Image (cartoon, grey):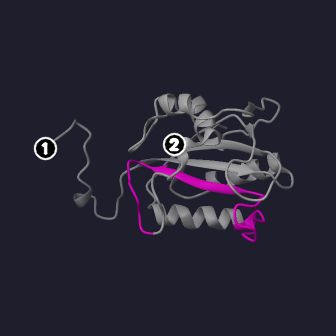
Amino acid sequence: MSNGPFDIDVDTLGNMRPISKVVFSLGSNMGDSPALLAEAVELLADTPDLIMVDVSPVYQTPFAGEGPEQDDYLNLVVVAESTLEPMTLLDRVLAIEESLGRKRVIPKGPRTIDIDIVMVGKRVSEEDIELPHPRAYERAFVLVPWLDVDPAAEIAGAGPIAELVKHVDKTGVVRRDDIVIANPGKR
């Protein structure tokens, strides 16, 4: 059964893979956070088979969740397209975090850089990675910047982000127009 003229039968692609929308959430609250975010975006853009679509404005957000008290974060969202598998994307994200000095010493502690894969197409749970990210739908630091660059987006199983953002606590979430992280794909 066909749902439209562009349906892809992935079984007949051979070594080719369909292009999926990929959403990353980036945050930093240690060191030179604007520079670290910019470098992380550049490194994502340098990833083979990953095409940058858009980079959200930067938002300053209070720490959300349990863990040691810490400084506010700077957050942004990257929307991309890729043929890469989720585990390959995760390997790339972990390599970028490591190259930018991410240390996993204190669980839920401050960090130089944190990159979460929010979603890869409409995939739901893959091997060692939960897709979509299990708490993205309740996090203002993900939904608010994402809404800026992809207002029609939806999280599988949770709904449209335009609706989800109405139900999250946006206290302390401030758009930082004084910090601009360029989209390397639009040069």
The tag earlier along the polypeptide, 1 or 2, is 1
What kind of residue is marked 2? Tyr
- Quadrant of the image containing the N terminus: top left
Task: State which region is magenta.
Answer: 98-127
Q: Residue at x 46, y 51 (%)?
A: 132
Number of other residues with Cα within 10 Å of mark 1, as a class: few under 14, some 14 to 19, many 20 or more: few
Q: Residues within 10 Å of mark 2 (few under 14, many from 20)?
A: many
Q: Which residue is denoted by mark 2 in the rendering?
A: 137
**Residue 33 versus residue 49: which sits nearer the camera?**
33
The quarter of the picture where residue 53 lies is top right
Q: Residue 43 at x, y = what percent?
A: 67, 56
Asked if 156 appears above or below 50 in the picture, the reply is above
Q: Residue at x 49, y 53 (%)?
A: 134
Question: Which numbered marker is on residue 69?
Answer: none
Does residue 132 sit above or below 77 in this rendering?
below
Q: Total number of numbered labels?
A: 2
What residue is pinned by disc 1? 1
| Secondary structure type for disc 1 | loop
Q: Secondary structure at mark 2?
A: helix
Which quarter of the picture shows residue 34?
A: top right
